[in-house]
Amino acid sequence: MLRRYAHGWNDLIMGKLKIFLLLVMLAAGSVAYYAYSPLTLPKLPFEFSLNQGSSLTAVARQFEQAGLPGNPRLFVIFARLQGRAGQIKAGIYQLDHAVSRMELLQIITQGNASKSQVTIIEGWNFRQLRDALNASPNIRHDTLGMSNSEILQRIGAFESHPEGLFFPDTYYVAAGSSDVDLLKFAYRTMRQRLEAAWLARSPSLPLAAPYQALILASIVEKETGTPADRAMIAGVFVNRLRRHMLLQTDPAVIYGLGETFDGDLRSRDLTNDTPYNTYTRAGLPPTPIAMPGRDSLYAALHPANTDALYFVARGDGSSKFSSNLTEHNRAVNQYQKYQK
């Protein structure tokens, strides 16, 4: 009786083991079919882009938006099973033939992009831009040993100082192309945007040339904490220029301190005379202090119609504007106490 029971129990275990093995084989076959069967592409060549910093889920969503067939959730699971979730490389990719999902995963994790994505951030200075280009793995670093003057010469710039000359945007360049080409394109883009903005400027501005507008726009870029204040901040500086008042803008002073600035602007810094110290020197600084974006260019050339001459940060990103010094000092006391 016990033998029959043991024999039956063994048969039951063996039967379940066979079912389990069969299920494993079916699952493995399904994964293999999913991984290696060719994708039906909407067209050839098929181009798609992956944004910088995208998560695996975001990548799958970008595939779906580009028209790549298949369930994006399954691709996320597949990539994680392969241990490749954190290896996605941004760029523009072009497929010239049908590929499997395994091949697709290898392409986007090895960075075999036909184009690379490089983003220039509004408010960056030229040193930050150079650092970003040098850190980009998908372009050729021809400027690595060049001085700023040599770079300006290579891109055909007329100016003698590189600050503010490159338009902040996301650029797509051929993988392996030179950073010189990217800088040349960003420089030409800024010139075109600046010239167009200058031609459409508001009348009677206290600015003599487009380059002065670029300088003012760079100050507006660095002073703006919330977009809604941009035109008002430009209006304050335009009013001060009209009245021949000192601009007294901290970001310009900080720029003049260069790499010696430790993050704490002190009273002695405001009296330390440099070409960029707008507390000791009248008018605009000699060059831009950062790369202004489209909205700051527009604000500098279309400032708000206001009688404000002062502003102070509220501590939440916005600014409090005042038309006289008494009102301004009251706001400074109020918001400095609030920030403390």
Image (spheres, rainbow, N blue to C red):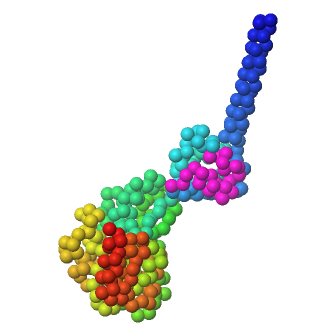
Taking the image as shown, residue 314 lies to the left or right of residue 193, namely: left
Query: Looking at the figure, which quarter contains the N terminus?
Result: top right
Residue lying furthest bottom: 204
Query: Looking at the figure, which quarter contains the C terminus?
Result: bottom left
When asked about the image quadrant of residue 334, the answer is bottom left
The answer to whether residue 161 of the structure is visible from this angle is no
The answer to whether residue 323 of the structure is visible from this angle is yes
**What residue range appears in magenta?**
53-76
Question: Looking at the image, is 58 positioned above or below residue 164?
Answer: above
At which x and y percent is residue 12? 77, 18
Residue at the spot x=41%, y=93% of the render?
204
Question: Looking at the image, is 2 positioned above or below residue 203?
Answer: above
Camera-nearest residue between 109 and 62: 62
Camera-nearest residue between 147 and 305: 305
At which x and y percent is residue 51? 54, 58
Q: Is residue 61 magenta?
A: yes
Residue at the spot x=38%, y=71% of the render?
315
At which x and y percent is residue 184? 43, 68
Taking the image as shown, residue 323 lies to the left or right of residue 253, namely: right
